Each structure stands twice: as C-alpha cells, then as structure tokens.
Image: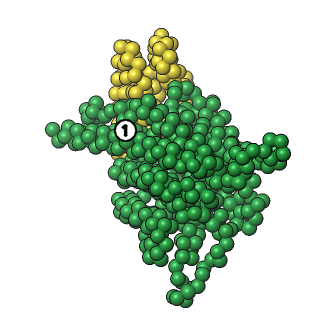
Chain colours: A yellow, B green
Amino acid sequence: MTSIPDYMTSKHRECDDYFTEAESAVAKDNWSEAETKWQLFSDEFAQHLSQEEETLFPQFEQATGMTAGPTQVMRMEHQQMRALVQDMNNALEKKLKDEYLGLSETLMVMMQQHNMKEEMMLYPMMAQHLTNGEQLISSFEAS
Amino acid sequence: MNMSGLSFNALPPIDLPFRFFLTAPLFIIACSVYVIFYGDSLWLSRWTPGMLTLTHAFTLGFITMVMMGASLQLLPVIGGIGLKHPRFVASTSYLLHCIGTLCLLFAFNFTHEWWFSLAIVFLSVSFFIYIYALIDVLIKKLSQGDSIVGFRLAMACLIVVIVLGLVLISRNLDLASIGLGQVLSADKHFTNIHAVWGIAGWGSLLIIAVSFQVIPMFHVAPNFPVLIRKSLTWFVTLLLIIYLFSPSWSIPFLFRAHAIFAMCLLWVLSQRKRRITDTTIRYWQFAAIALLLSNILYFLPEAWLVNDSQSNSIVQRILQQKELILAATIVYGYLVSVIQGMLIKILPFLSYTHLQQRCLMDFSAMQLIPNMHDFFTKKQALILFVLHAVTSILLLVVIIDNQFFRLFAVSLMLEFSWLFFLLLKTALLYSQVNRKITLSSQS
C-alpha cells in the first residue's frame, strides 16, 4: 500500500521528468520530440491536479474543517499553472523557442515551489488526517 | 502536528530583501576605487589596513548583507514560517548594518577610537535585532529537517563570529580608563577563530544547507546523499569547535569536509535532469572547483614545489602568499560565486513569485507578469559569470604579483557594476509590473 506523500511526490517527479525532456528537446530544436514529451507532461499534470482538486482536497477539507487554508491557496496556484501551460501550448504550436524557454523557466520555478509546499506540508498533513489515504491512492493507481 | 503556525504565504514584502541585495554590490564598487588609490602595498599581508578593509567590505558589506536579505526570504520557503514584524526587523537591521560596516571600514583606515566605538554600537545593535528575530523562528518546530538544521548551526556560528569580532575591535578602545582593561590578549589565534568560523561556519554552513534545498528544486537534480545531508553540517560544526583548541588538527579536516561537499555537489549537478544551459549551474560548478583547488594547494607538499632545479620566483611567491591565496580562493571562488549564482536565480524567482501571489485574487492580471527571462536574459547572466571568472583569476594574479592591482580593481568594478545593473533592472521591472497589477485590480 502506498501512502499519500509517497505516491503524490512520485507523480511530481514523473511530471518533472517529462517537463525537462520537453524543454531539452525545444532547446535542441527537436520539435517532434518536444511535442511528444509535452503531451505526456500535460496529461500527467492534468490528472494530478484533478486528483488533488476532486478527491484529496475535499476529503482533507472535510476532515480538518480548513476550507480557506492551504488547499485554497493550492487551488489558486493550480489555476495559474494551468494558464502558463496554456501559454506554453501556444508557444509550442507556433515553434517560438525563446518564448517557450522563458515560460518553461517560469513554470518550472512555480511548480517547484508549489510542489515543495505540498510535499513538505500539505501531503504529510493529509497522511495524518485522512484515515483512508492508502485506499484513495489505490483507487488512483487503478484508474 | 501543529498547523496553526504553518503559512503558505509567509513571504515578506519584496522591498525588504531587495534593499539588502541592491546595496551589497555598492560596497564592492566603492572598494574597487579604494583598491586603486591604496596602491600595491595593500597585498603585503592580511594585516594591512587595506586588506582588513577589503576583507570586511566583502564579508560584511557583500556576503553577510546578501545572506541577511536572503534569509528573510528563505525561512518562509524552507521552514514554512516567516519572521514576526519583518518590516521593522529588516529595515532597522539593514540601516544599522550599513552604517556599522561603513564605520568599521573607516576605523581600519582612520584609527580614531570613535570610529571603532560607532562600529561596535551599530553592528551589535543591528545583529542583535536580526539574530533575535531569526532565533525566534528557528527555535520553533519547523516543517523541514536538513536545511533548517544547517541554518541553525550557521546562525550559531554567526553569533560567535560577531561576539569575537566586537571583542577584537574593542581592543582598539581605551577600555582600561573605564576599568575594563583588554578583554582579549592580542593573540592571532582569536583573529583566526573569527575568520575561520566566519568563512567555514556562517558562510559555508549556510551555503551547504541552502544547496541541499535549492539544487534539487531549481535544477531537477537528485537529493544529496542522506549521509551528507544528515551529517555534513554537524561535522563541520564539530570541527569548528575542535578548532578552538587545536587549530592545526582541525584545519586539514575542514578542508577535506569541503572537498567532500564539492565532490557531492559536482555529482548531484552531473545527475540533474534539467540539462538546459543555466548560468547558476556554472557558478555552482565554479565554486566546487575552487574548493577542490584550495584543497590541492593546501595539501600539496611544499617539497614538491620547491626543489633546486625547478624552483622559480612564481612558485616562491605562491608559497609566501599561500594563506592569502587560500583565503581568496575560498571567499571569492567559493562563497562569492555561490552568492552571485543564487542571486541571479532567486531575483527573477522572487520577483515572479511576489507578482504571482498578487494575482491569486485577480487572475486576469497574470498576463501582465513577465516571464523569468524578461527580468534579465541568459546572455546578461552569462556576462556576469565571465566577469566573475576573470576577476577571480586576476585576484590570484594580484596576490602573487602586486603590480597588477589596477587591472584587478577595474575588473572588480566592472563585475559588480554589472551585477548592480541586473539587480536594478529586475527591481525596476518588478515595480513597473506591480503598478500595472494595482491599476488592473482597481479598474
């Protein structure tokens, strides 16, 4: 059985891998490789965010009664990251290398500090408060 | 787990760290002019007024100044809690630190007693406010282990360095007339403790602690090995304590500990997944190589360098100036390199993060925020690195052959003027966009 912090953190690393591979491909002007990796990233990214927003955050809010706390900030940051991902989609479509790399540096930094807050604080708090944490992760793994 | 103390948005206002960052290069620019006017006698030993001025302009005016500003920002990120009353703490300690450092630099040159007295008053009050505020946070149970431990140890070293520094400069005062007499005898051992604890304790421990956190984060690299993360900062601290009693036994181990750190650093960087060119990576690599070179110079048996057939004047000079060369390689090649590398990474990062936090409530304003490369380009960062590398080499050259002091001073001035330009550019773009976001949220 995998815990919430272990599983969700491993998903962050997986997203990082696809993200950096796409970024390296753009830097080398290898646009087809970039598109493949970017697609893998986008799918993982979207799934991860929805697992948090639709399952983990509501359960955590219910268990702790903290509806306007960390989860609220995380939701707002998700929105901002989605906007950056959209901008990067456009840059990739138009093959705008400098634009893409400037945005990727930005999203990278934003993702890393967002992930750090989740990994250092939110996930351990979830593991502590959600008694059904491992079951939830099993359902994620099965999906 | 106590969640009430945890804050996801504990970042202090950006102008607080920015004032430290923007002022720091000005000390070095002023210093470069001073080096030109002082002449080549500055480099004769570590005890000349010129050398004392230069080292303290670097350590207090640049290194500590930036670290004080960065700590304000780092604590909320790595510990999850910000300072209480950040504006009071940062503004007061900043102002007093600037005045105190200037007084100390004047004191080294115009040995009037009152310059020393003023330096003691301003620096002690400044550090007291700053350290008290940080300790108030650091004693709490914070969210994360390894970096915070290193942070605490670095802070403990800073206290020792400051207390010792204040006592050392108090030797210039006529304390006998007020019944205190000389607190410490004029023993080189105490000045060495002050210097070694400052460099390997306050400077290096903070850098080591921060590297555990920021290298995996910014460069998608693996974590440092667990053993290193858990034990290196404690090991260095232990060696510093041993140094108090047995310097000759402790110093070789301090060098080795830093060689291990340098090799781990190079290994972690080599394993990074993010392969895109990045000037901050070059700075980290440069710093690691400087540490390894200082180890080579320290451990190389002098008999290998000096033998009848090969000894020449350059080798002789290197041996004569070994202490200064080691200090320069460690302070300039290691500490200053990492600090510059971090500055060019965290400035756009902080600017972006602060602007982004402002847009949490006004999502449409996100489009106004520049991307990281808009603050300054990769090429502009690379120019800074090249200037830094050139100045580092010229620093070694001038220590070996003092006549090149003007060339070194010009290179130093160019490097830190360029750094100042990049900092100013970022701060101006930040405030410009910040105003636009305010207008957008009002409309």
Query: Can you say whether B292 is above or below A111 in the image?
Result: below
Q: Is residue B411 visible?
A: yes
Quadrant, the C terminus of chain B: top left
Of B199 and B400, the residue lying toward us: B400
**Label 1: how many Cα within 10 Å (few below 14, some 14–19, many 20+):** many
* Disc 1 element: helix
Chain hosting mark 1: B
The residue lying at 50 percent from left, 67 percent from top is B108
Percent coordinates x, y for residue B79 in the rendering: 50, 51
In this orientation, which residue lies closer to the viewer: B155 or A116?
B155
| Number of residue marks | 1
The image position of residue A80, as x and y in percent, is 35, 32
Residue B320, quarter of picture: bottom right
Residue A121: give x, y in percent of width and height: 49, 45
For residue A46, say whether it is visible.
no
Q: Amino acid at mark 1?
A: Tyr
Residue found at x 57% / y 58%: B41
Residue at the left extreme of this rendering: B443
Q: Residue at x 63, y 43 (%)?
A: B290
Q: Is residue B6 above or below residue B162?
A: above
Q: Which residue corresponds to mark 1?
A: B352
Q: Tell me the quarter of the picture where residue A99 sits.
A: top left
Q: Quadrant of residue B283?
A: top right
What residue is rendered at 58% in x and 69% in y? B164
Towards the viewer: A51 or A91: A91
Residue A118 coordinates in the image, percent (x, y): 48, 40
Relative height, residue B12 to residue A22 (above, below): below
